[in-house]
Amino acid sequence: MEYTIHDVARIAKVGIGTVSRVLNNNPNVKPATREKVLAVIAELHYKPNPIARSMISRRTNSIGVMIPFFTRPFHIEILRNVEAALHPTNMQIVLYNIETNAQRDAYFLDLPMRRRVDGLLVISLPVEDAVAQDIKNAGIPTVLLDTYNPLLTSLVVNNVEGAYQAVKCLIKKGHRHIGFINGLTNESNFKFNQANDRLIGFHRALGEAGLLFDPEMFLTSEWSREAGRATALQLLSHGRRPTAIFAASDIQAVGVLEAARSLNIRIPEELSLIGFDGIELSELLDFSTIQQPIEEMGFLSIQKLIAHIDRPETQPELIRLNTTLVERHTTAFSL
């Protein structure tokens, strides 16, 4: 037999409201009454109906995750860690795959109105101040990951320092002709500041070593394996080809590996390579990379979002996470 909250209230000889307060850990219940209600709940093996509870609490027990191009390896790994962080809470993910600005703006307008989720995690998508203010005004707890707005809690990686670490490593190994394959700063009309920051880190390392920036050693491509391969072929077919390449993402670095193989260029003997992200593929293919703290990013973003859901008055904060240089078998000293 399946018991209801009415059965619990009747047997415990209290009102339904009291049972509800006990279930929601409301402190405004006398200890003796709480013990009596809990004893009846245990005796009946009563389990609250999640739909009914959500109607009472006005919660959906779900969070929205807005993410661009979620089929890309970096975003897949972020999502896996977000899901792992959510698992103990029994909350569900409602995934919004964003491919265009129009799609993004439509979701931003729709979600506050319909309250389909308890909170929102926005990954890699820039949020304009006006939109951030609308989200705050609507009372939607929101956390940004891999992007920043001062009005919302934001978790960002120090991309400048990460790129600096990569290029400094190559310089220390004697490389002076270093190619850089950066990602597009504007893709599908999304502005990705990560590319700008990684370019700043590249310049910083060169400047510190007294090396001049060579525009012919700097190319940009889409954030994909195919684009990375095509761009690497351009660099490696240059009359004065680089002795090392820094790729702004691991998936572009995979393209560099393919290009080098097609040209019979040995890695690392003739070409050193460092990627950026630290996705599992970098370990599988054994190439050096700048490791983003992907696991920490997923867990910390959920921790902060739940804190905002439970305590709406929580003030926004900026959290900076550090990267780590992971050297494998694609970096060597220049001949």
Image: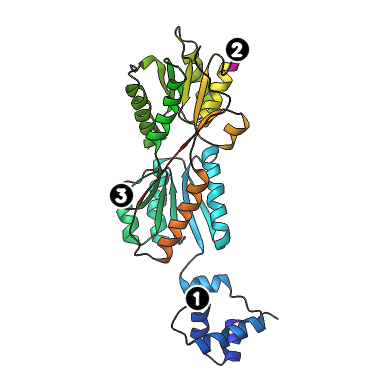
Q: For this rendering, which residue is in front, 190 or 193? A: 193
Residue 189 visible in image: no
Percent across and percent down for residue 272 are 52, 20
Q: List the single residue furthest toward the top.
A: 239
What is the crowding at mark 3: few (fewer than 14 residues within 10 Å), some, or many (at least 20)?
few
Q: Position of residue 151 (x, y in %)?
A: 31, 52
Which disc number belongs to residue 150?
A: 3
Q: Disc 1 marks which amino acid?
A: Asn
Q: In which image quadrant can residue 258 be found?
A: top right
Q: Residue at x 48, y 57 (%)?
A: 63
Image vertical order of residue 174 relative to residue 144, above or below: above
Tell me the crowding category of disc 2: few under 14, some 14 to 19, or many 20 or more residues within 10 angstroms, Cα based.
Answer: few
Q: Is residue 312 magenta?
A: no
Determine the main secondary structure of the stretch shown in magenta.
Answer: loop
Is residue 50 positioned above or below 94 on the image? below
Q: Quick check: marks 2 and 1 in contact, CB under 8 Å?
A: no
Circles 2 and 3: CB atoms closer than 8 Å: no
- Looking at the rendered structure, which numbered label has been put on residue 24? 1
Instruction: Name which quarter of the figure residue 254 lies in.
Output: top right
Mark 2 lies on a secondary structure that is: loop
Residue span colored magenta: 261-268
- The residue sitting at the bottom extreme is 13
C-alpha span from label 1 to label 3 = 33 Å
Q: Amino acid at mark 3?
A: Pro
Q: Earlier in the sequence, mark 2 or mark 3?
A: 3
Task: Please give the residue where the numbered disc 2 appears in the rendered image.
Answer: 264
Q: Nearer the viewer, residue 151 or 161?
A: 161
